[in-house]
Amino acid sequence: MKDAYKGVFYTNDFSYLRNPAYDGPHFAYHHESNMRGLGLTGIDDQFWLSRVRLFSNYRVTENIRVFGEYLYADSGGEDFAPRPIEENRGEFQNLFVDATLFDCDEMQVSGRAGRQELLLGAERLVSPLDWANTRRTFDGYRATVRSSQNTVDLFYTNPVNRIAATGGTNEWDSSNNNQSFYGAYLSNKSLGKDYGVTALEAYYIGYDNTDQNFSFHTLGSRVAGKMDSVLYEFEGGVQFGDNADGSGHDAGFMAAGLGKVLNADGTLGTWSPTVWAWYDWASGGDSALIAPGDDGFHHYFPLAHKYNGFMDLFGRRNLNDVNVQFISPIGKRVNFLVWYHYFFLDQATTPYSVVMTPYNAGNAAVSKDLGHEIDLLWTIAINPRHNLMIGYSHFNSGDYYNTPGVAFGGDADFFYSQYQVRF
């Protein structure tokens, strides 16, 4: 598990996304056509987002430290109510105590207690959700055991409820004790080095949710690396437990990618673009139970924006995503990305939003064809502390949107820009 508060971020050709190094002022503009809310809604809106994060790190002794971070997130100019991830007018994002419990040449054991962000591997299942204006955090405990070759993280937490603090209230966020999130995560640094392996991980993650009456458990692993000019990554897992109706849960997911650095031999001079081809799959359930606790795969607390389209139309549940990606520097300060996705259902029931709510719970899908998305993104590094991001995405809806009961069946567009200052 990586520490988001240290600014560590998985960047296997995803460096164009927001880096959770500590922000100074952070401003973004969104223009959303037919997608205000969750999924395709037929609603247009435009608005501004702003965020500030301030932190303090106090070293009490050589083995104990206290870390705190304050976050203020706001939105303005919208015609419709902001999403929960867009506003949080003042709260502790992190407030924890770290202690070194044991330290010798072969092993170090440390513990953490309090409010903390979680980041696991490539963030497909667990992430601070830096794309959200408010970010995500948990209350709980974590133990880390490190050796020269392995790191094992054990954690037990409760998700923190977001309170926008609007309407004149100043209520602090509190953890949801009806939801328990826990697990063990192993990272190895040595196995497979001769084969260009840069990440080798295995994990167990559990999630008990009495609000929605389900309990899910996931066993998974991930490997990523580079051999000469060829890049690769694979992550997959099985999920089991109890569905909301008491039936047994049986689900799984898989993501596989193969990339190529096009100018590895230098024949194109300093220009060094990269291409990737990906296939993402997350299982769906049958039509007997369509709900957040149904038999489809549950993606837990991910950075969905990082993988299944920048428009955030679909969560990793009952989903196939075939996508290709081209990344290229333009000069020394600009990065350009173009990313194409084709989405289709695993089972002919319903897609799910990024918060795992079904689009349509009452009718079987007339088609598995969800549609096509194209994402364009320019990232401009003005200097080491200032950057600008400009993006445009378009979604062409598929035949699924002819299903009776679906809210909107047209196309959608998303334009956004972001200016960020880092301390």
Image (cartoon, helix red, strand yellow):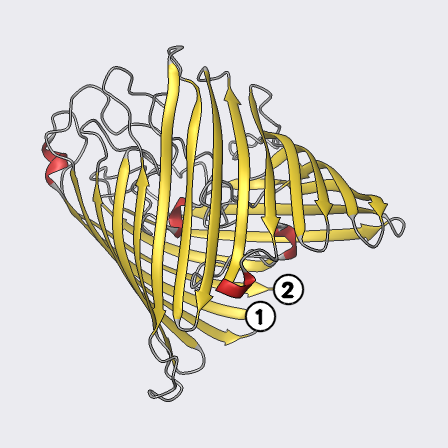
Q: Secondary structure at mark 2?
A: loop
Q: Amino acid at mark 1?
A: Arg
Residue extending furthest toward the top: 246
Q: Residue at x 10, y 29 (%)?
A: 366
Q: Is residue 213 left or right of residue 160?
A: left
User: In this figure, which residue is indicated by the disc labeled 2?
Assistant: 423
247 versus 6 height, above or below: above
Compared to residue 84, the image places residue 127 above or below, namely: below
Q: Position of residue 145 (x, y in %)?
A: 72, 44
The picture places residue 228, in percent across and down from the top left corner, at 43, 73
Q: Earlier in the sequence, mark 2 or mark 1?
A: 1
Is 146 left or right of 322, judged from the image as shown?
right
Crowding around mark 2 (Cα neighbors within 10 Å: few <14, some 14 to 19, many 20+) is few
Which residue lies at the image location 52% right of the left edge and 26% below the top edge? Answer: 207
All told, the count of numbered labels is 2
Seen at 49% across and 69% down, the residue is 387
Q: Nearer the viewer, residue 163 or 256?
A: 256
Q: Is residue 64 left or right of residue 147?
A: right
Q: Residue at x 35, y 75 (%)?
A: 273
56 left or right, relative to 178: right
Nearer to us in this view, 231 or 208: 231
Q: Which residue is mark 1?
A: 385
Find residue 78 and report its horizontal and vertical position in percent. 36, 45
Which amino acid type is marked by label 2? Phe
Rate crowding at label 1 as few (under 14), some (14 to 19) or many (20 or more) other CA atoms within 10 Å.
few
| Relative vertical location of residue 323 with respect to residue 168 in this rendering, above or below | below
> Mark 2 and 1 residues: CB-CB less than 8 Å, in contact?
yes
Depth order, front residue of 375/287: 287
Kindly report the distance in space between the C-alpha atoms of the residues bearing marks 2 and 1.
7 Å
